[in-house]
Image (cartoon, grey):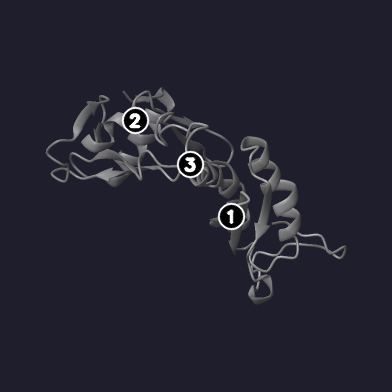
Amino acid sequence: MISISETAQQYFQRLIDQQDEEGLGLRISVNHAGTPGAGCDLQFCPLGQTMPDDRVVDFGGFKLYVASASEQWLENAEIDFEEDSTGGQLTIKAPGIKGSEPSGEAPLEERVNWLLETEINPALASHGGRVALVEITDLKEVVLQFGGGCHGCGMADVTLKQGIEQTLTRNIPEITAVKDATDHESGTNPYYAGDASGESAV
């Protein structure tokens, strides 16, 4: 099931103590389980606000309530807290939360979307951008639409050719080309970051 490190337990206990609320616990669930966009939702859980089928895990100083529908996706999950000079970082590792990567026999669209959501968009998110699949042509050309901070960016073509296209063709060799269907002239690129040389990050 779920394991919580000693440092994470101490961290949670401090947070709960600060709330000064009788019977306060934590509840964890999974949003969009089994998909590339899956994520954990960990929140305070006041007494009496649990669900009848929640699984209760007692950690001594507090209780963790696990949503029944999320239990299978949290198998072997690990919660840790690493202290540092800025306070610390809480991490939740749930190996099975996103389900399994599509096999080589899966539809091309499914395999492309998996890579977009698990590898490409997480990298673009640091610049406020993302891409979405528009279509896959009969020639197995992948047509993408840029959005967010990548819409209107002068470096979008570099990102497409040197980052996205390489990632997709490396993992899915049958892809013949990756094309951009975005109208970048209409974008304002609010996340533009560059210098006098004209270089920017996408």
Q: Residue furthest right?
A: 197
Image: 71 above or below 158 = above
Q: Residue 149: x percent and y percent?
A: 62, 63
State yes or no: discs 2 and 1 in contact (Cβ < 8 Å).
Answer: no
Kind of residue at badge 2: Leu
Mark 2 vs mark 1, CA separation in Å: 38 Å
Mark 2 vs mark 3, CA separation in Å: 27 Å
Depth check, mark 2 against mark 1: the one in front is 1
Q: Quadrant of residue 39?
A: top left
Q: Quadrant of residue 1?
A: top left
Q: Residue furthest front?
A: 138
Q: Which mark is residue 107?
A: 3
Kind of residue at badge 1: Thr
Q: Is residue 67 visible?
A: no
Disc with the residue nearer the chain's start (3 vs 1):
3
Q: Is residue 141 visible?
A: yes
Image: 147 above or below 186 = above
In the picture provided, is 34 more to the left or to the right than 149?
A: left
- Secondary element type, mark 1: loop
| Number of marks | 3
The residue that mark 1 highlights is 137
Depth check, mark 2 against mark 3: the one in front is 3
The residue that mark 2 highlights is 74
Q: Residue 113: x percent and y percent?
A: 51, 47
Q: Residue 181: x percent and y percent?
A: 63, 64
- Secondary element type, mark 3: loop
